[in-house]
Image: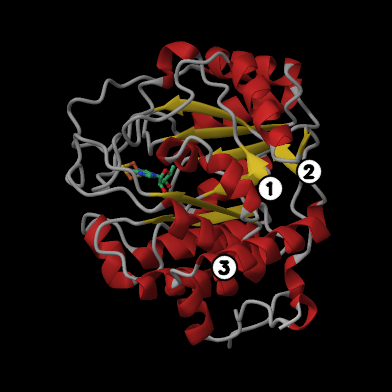
Amino acid sequence: MPKALMPGPDIESDAGLLDLITTKDPQREEALFAEARRRRAEHYGSGVYFRGLIEFSNYCRNDCYYCGIRRGNARAERYRLDTDAILNCCRMGDLLGYKTFVLQSGEDPWFTDERMVEILGAIRREFPDHAITLSIGEKSRESYERFFRAGANRYLLRHETADEAHYRALHPASMSLAERKQCLFNLKEIGYQVGAGFMVGTPFQTPENLLEDLRFLRELRPHMVGIGPFIPQKDTPFGGYPPGSLELTLRMVALTRLILPGALIPATTALGTISPRGRERGLMAGANVVMPNLSPKAVRKLYSLYDNKICTGDEAAECRLCMEGRIRDFGFEPDMARGDAIDGNEQSPCLC
Ligand code: 5AD
Ligand code: FES
């Protein structure tokens, strides 16, 4: 069939989506990636936004079975950055041209709402025009409101899996998918630009679970979606399971781009960890954001969600330069603008 008459990937039906999730046909896969690149270019051209990631505490009250900084991991060496250290990361990031700071941590009770508001206030005073993204887990609606008023603009909270039974298989009984989803809807209502997301290849995951993730994205319509392969961490209950597949992760990135064409989708560090050009391939599958690390070099290795994490030995400036080079090699343009979410998701067809 001439190329112009070839039907595009069928993302309208569950059967079509499942077919694309599971395809082993390299030609169909490449057509999917090409369509995702086309949609991405429609909204974002060839630009790739940079976000500076500050991992400010690896203490966590939760015990997710997959995560290296889970409470039950007695071998994790714990650290916290104080307000000054966090501000210094922001200053370094600002000098390097970053316009977004992403503050990520485990669910660390030491960082009470009051302390978070103080930190947010300090960053806001010094950087009134930067975007501040929080990624600090599940909180009450009131807490989210306080952080928003204190200057946070965006919030990342991956749902991890949108299937109830699968969620229970990945988390202890104290955590629930319903709670997670409620947090995401609360964040959206408050006015945050919201990031959901999931891991690919976690133990017990089925293609139907991944379909459920896409259906949930259609329902929530987040501004950002983080997708990365599961990677085992040796001191966790899932330490003996195999990592997620690169190709399947890339197909999920591409399908997410087709479902939410205006979304901000990072080419994740986990993708770069399972394959030397994983992040670049993420961009080629429709991603348009990278999140180089701004954390102090001394603590980088300790924020060890999974084994063999890349970029733990580099200075912030090296990380930025390295990412710039990699991006250009694949025909993309680094974009240091704030890069707020655009309202491009309304064109997505509805499944209901
Ligand atoms: N492999 C890959 N990603 C992981 N995360 C946590 N543990 C792992 C792992 N073992 C991801 C989760 C979390 C994000 C911060 O890191 O999706 O939301
Ligand atoms: Fe920290 Fe899951 S182990 S949120």
Q: Relative to 152, does residue 9 appear above or below in the rendering?
A: below
Q: Amino acid at mark 2?
A: Gly
Give the residue pinned by disc 3: 27
Report the front residue among 234 and 161.
234
Which residue is drawn at the image coordinates 43% and 36% (left, top)? Answer: 273
**Residue 295, image x, y percentages:** 52, 20
**Residue 217, image x, y percentages:** 55, 68
Q: Which circle's residue, 3 or 1, is located before the other in the chain? A: 3
State which quarter of the image contains the C terminus.
bottom right
Q: State if disc 1 and disc 2 touch (CB < 8 Å).
A: yes
Give the residue pinned by disc 2: 47
**Residue 194, image x, y percentages:** 61, 54
Q: Could you say which quadrant of the image residue 84 lies in?
A: top right
State which quarter of the image contains the N terminus.
bottom right
- The alpha-carbon separation of the residues under discs 3 and 2 comes to 26 Å
Q: Relative to 81, does residue 31 appear above or below in the rendering?
A: below
Q: Could you say which quadrant of the image residue 345 lies in?
A: bottom right
Q: State if disc 2 and disc 3 touch (CB < 8 Å).
A: no
Task: Answer whether residue 131 is visible to the viewer in this image.
Answer: no
Q: Is residue 180 left or right of residue 290?
A: left
Q: Is residue 283 left or right of residue 83?
A: right
Local crowd size for mark 2, using a 10 Å CA cut-off: few (<14), some (14–19), many (≥20)? many
- Secondary-structure class at tag 2: strand
- The alpha-carbon separation of the residues under discs 2 and 1 comes to 7 Å
Q: Is residue 46 left or right of residue 350?
A: right
Of tags 3 and 2, the one toward the viewer is: 3
Q: Which circle's residue, 3 or 2, is located before the other in the chain? A: 3
Which residue is drawn at the image coordinates 33% and 36% (left, top)? Answer: 306
Q: Residue furthest front?
A: 1
Q: Is residue 138 left or right of residue 237?
A: right
Q: Which circle's residue, 2 or 1, is located before the other in the chain? A: 2
**Residue 288 — which label?**
1
